[in-house]
Image (cartoon, helix red, strand yellow):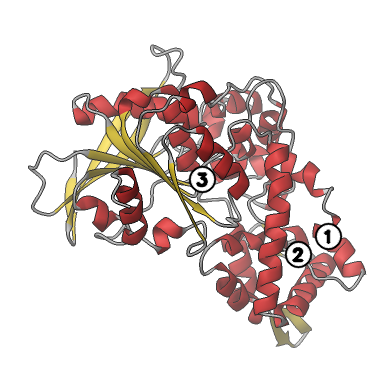
Amino acid sequence: MNSYRQPGVVLTDRRFTVPLDHSDPGGEQIEVYGREAVATGRTGDELPWLVYLEGGPGFGARRFVGTEAWLGRALREYRVLLLDQRGTGRSTPATRQTLPLRGGPREQADYLAHFRSDAIVRDCELIRPQLTGGAPWTVLGQSFGGFCAVRYLSSAPEGLATVLITGGLPSLDAHADDVYRAAYPRIERKVAAHYARYPQDVERARAIAAHLAEHRPESAGHRLTPELFQSLGQLLGGGNGSHQLHYLLENAFVRTPHGVELSDAFQEALRSTTSFAGHPLYALIHESIYGQGEEATGWSAERVRAEFPQFDAAKALAGDGPVLFTGETIHPWHFDVDPALRPLRETAELLARRTDWPVLYDPERLAANEVPVAAAVYHDDMYVDTEHSLRTAAAIRGLRAWVTNEYEHDGVRAGGPRVLDRLLAMVRDDV
């Protein structure tokens, strides 16, 4: 193990070997990486463990510098494991470069079927006794990490001392279609709020979408289409996202000897903001995280979007309406425009057709829950439906929910110590 220091914290690299398929423990093994963090001066102390499960799917744990955000608060009383969930970060990454080692698209899809929350929780349960000596630990789950935490409560509550969830209470039984039928109106509200804040962006967005529709430029292998431009709406789910989007749009065009063109800076920002090169699993298994039972997800976001024609850029440009941004949705065209995804198009198609997803949540076990649980539910969260979250909160015995509009979906990052303080006080009955 390698240990090293940053201001206020000692970090240690931890590596664990786990089965690819937990139903075949003697079969193929993969590596899972975690970064242990402990406050300077407390490396020898007996501290309870907190494992952090990042949002996603497909993102490794956040790379903190020192004790920034919520980590400093956690280190006052915990030894923290920042876990790269399987397939992400340094945990046997699954990308266009590595997946061909599995074989063709069929083999790749079968492999990726083992990368949902059920497998992540079983990884945690193999790792926990190696670190805690068998003692239960606290889980902090952000977004998809909260989905994993609810799965944990359903399948292995004996491993949990406390559960803290931020913006990540999933519906227990919704099909992906239900998720996206709830999502598109939320996204539309976020776009309307952005245009109310920055009305000049209405015409800017129309002009950019029209230019992309006519010229179809490319940037570093990315095909810049109106639909890709619309997906910048992913920014609108974060606390500063509306401002980031505005600044991105305001310098979109420049005058050149050949006329008005999209600036190199804008094209690079569009490419880098929408690229899945750093987190391809997000695109590959995003809809699969909702799969339960024998019904395929079937490119749900794409199918459901047809029920909301106001999101069709071509129709908006043909009339005088605003071009609406999208977000938190994955579409087949993502695998055509993004070079990090293009070789995985058939693999994604096979995952979309899959009809043998295990059920993830156990309502009876959740109704009998005895683990202290607190959850921050962000009012009108763009990424996770508030109504779905509150139904789940009511279904988990003893869960205490904090519903707030003070933060957006990234509240545990933006609010940091304050959010974690509030959740810890809730599970300890201090509020």
Point out residue 27 in the picture as x, y percentages from the top left corner. 42, 14
Give the labeled residue for mark 2: 324
Dot 1 or dot 2, earlier in sequence: 1
Q: Are marks 2 and 3 in contact (CB under 8 Å)?
A: no
On screen, 266 above or below 176? below
Left of 28 or right of it: where is 133? Answer: left
Q: Residue at x 59, y 23 (%)?
A: 110
Q: Which residue is mark 1?
A: 310
Label 2 crowd (10 A; few <14 / some 14-19 / many >=20):
many
Residue, x 75% and y 64% (percent of image)? 324
Where on the picture, by quarter, is residue 248? Answer: bottom right
Above or below, 413 against 42 in this view is below
Q: Position of residue 422 (x, y in %)?
A: 34, 55
At x 63% / y 45%, what residue is drawn?
341
Q: Which residue sits furthest right? A: 318
> Sequence-wise, which precedes: disc 2 or disc 3?
3
Judged from the image, the secondary structure of the residue bearing numbered disc 3 is loop
- Mark 3 touches mark 1? (CB < 8 Å): no
Asked whether, in this view, residue 255 is left or right of residue 54, the answer is: right
Measured as percent of width and height from the top left, residue 135 is found at 22, 27
Marks 1,2: beta carbons within 8 A: yes
Nearest the camera: 206 or 346?
206
Amino acid marked by disc 3: Gly
